[in-house]
Amino acid sequence: MAQIKINNLSFHYDTHGEDIFKNVCINIDTDWKLGLIGRNGRGKTTFLKLLQGEYKYSGQIISPVSFDYFPMTVDDDNKDALEVMRESIAPFTKWEKELEIYSNNIEYMKEYGEVLEKFIDHDGYIINEVIEKEVRKMGLETEILNRTFKTLSLGEQTKLLLVALFLKKNNFLLIDEPTNHLDTEGRECVAKYLQKKSGFILVSHDRDFLDKVINHILSINKNNIDIQKGNYSTWQLNNSKRDDFEKSENEKLLKEIKRLQIAAKQKSNWSNKVEATKKGCGPVDRGFIGHKAAKIMKRAKCLEKRQNKAIEEKSKLLKNIEEVEKLKISNIDSSSNKILEVIDLQIIYEKELFNNPVTFKVFGLEEKMDVENQV
């Protein structure tokens, strides 16, 4: 089992000086099914690009495997799906032509041997059969491989390209939002396929999809990056427990700090009042009073130290708690409580999503909704 090692990784964009990542140190096993989560703008896509070497950074990314990003660009979608998949895996057609040329000339025996070795290492002689087998595992019929790639639906293209990338040798996949073009049935097929695979980082806003596929979570938080074993639900449960604990500790420390502030102020005032009584007293009395005042002041200083320690402990809490602002919508039309009206809405995504156009109104105040045409 190999590891991708990230040591003291720091990165910021030239357009602003704030660090996106600072001194990040994590290890990723190459057989993990790793889910990458974090709020929008936290750096998920940036992290994937750093792994691919697209940005300059400080620190180290040491990997025994190469990274392949999904979705990738297809150079020529006018080719048959099988050829598109073959080219996505390795340059089989190019190697086949070179082998034919080199085999007819003894002067190119060395070149022939080099190309033949690569061809065999990548299963070149059985690659078509391997592709057909994997396509069936994805829940597709093999006849799809004979169709022109651009005539396939976006969902079918997604499935085929995922299969192709998993057939590449010595690679680690960076899968970015694979469910964008998939319906419910398609998501189930891809989830079942990924359950049997390993060695990838998966970014998805579909929490149910993540739960079915991953066995580790890498979360980009407000102030750190954290890796946990388990799926999204496990991470969410652990995160909620941590947040609840930190909120509880924070409230206790706030009360303690306030109590210590009041007590310290009282001790300081008492010390000053005692010190003031020294005037008009004899030498012995003044010494006794001064000693008493110093003793009270010392207690006040001890309370201040305890207060500062509590403040320091408090500063370690709530760093990763996400605050969600409440959404407020004001009515533009003061004579009505209607917030939104939609008339004859139809969404087309490869096909019409609704049987009939949808019309509805959304009201505020009374919190009622009038749907004139059901979806």
Image (cartoon, rainbow, N blue to C red):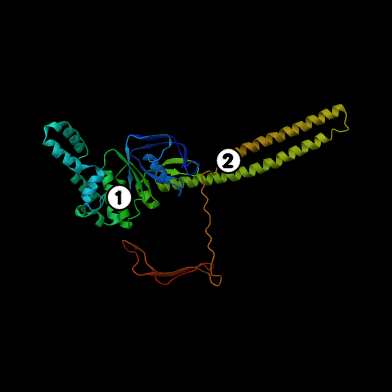
Q: Which mark is residue 192?
A: 1
Is residue 51 at all visible to an observer of this figure?
yes
Closest to the observer, 76 or 260: 76
Residue 235 is left or right of residue 303, and the answer is left
Tell me the element at label 2: helix
Residue 125 is left or right of residue 22, and the answer is left
**Residue at image coords 19%, 33%:** 114
Residue 291: x and y, percent?
78, 29
Q: Which mark is residue 358?
A: none
Q: Classify mark 2: residues with Cα within 10 Å, few (<14), some (14-19) or many (20+).
A: few
**Would you place residue 338 above or below residue 257 in this image?**
below
Is residue 229 at all visible to an observer of this figure?
no
**Residue at image coords 37%, 49%:** 210
Q: Quadrant of residue 144?
A: bottom left
Q: Which residue is labeled 2 in the image?
A: 315
Amino acid at the residue labelled 2? Ser
Query: Which is more N-terminal, label 2 or label 1?
Result: 1
Image quarter where the N terminus lies is top left
Residue 82: x and y, percent?
21, 49
Image quarter where the C terminus lies is bottom left
Amino acid at the residue labelled 1? Lys
Residue 280: x and y, percent?
88, 32
Q: Quadrant of residue 180?
A: bottom left
Tell me the element at label 1: helix
Q: Are marks 1 and 2 in contact (CB under 8 Å)?
A: no
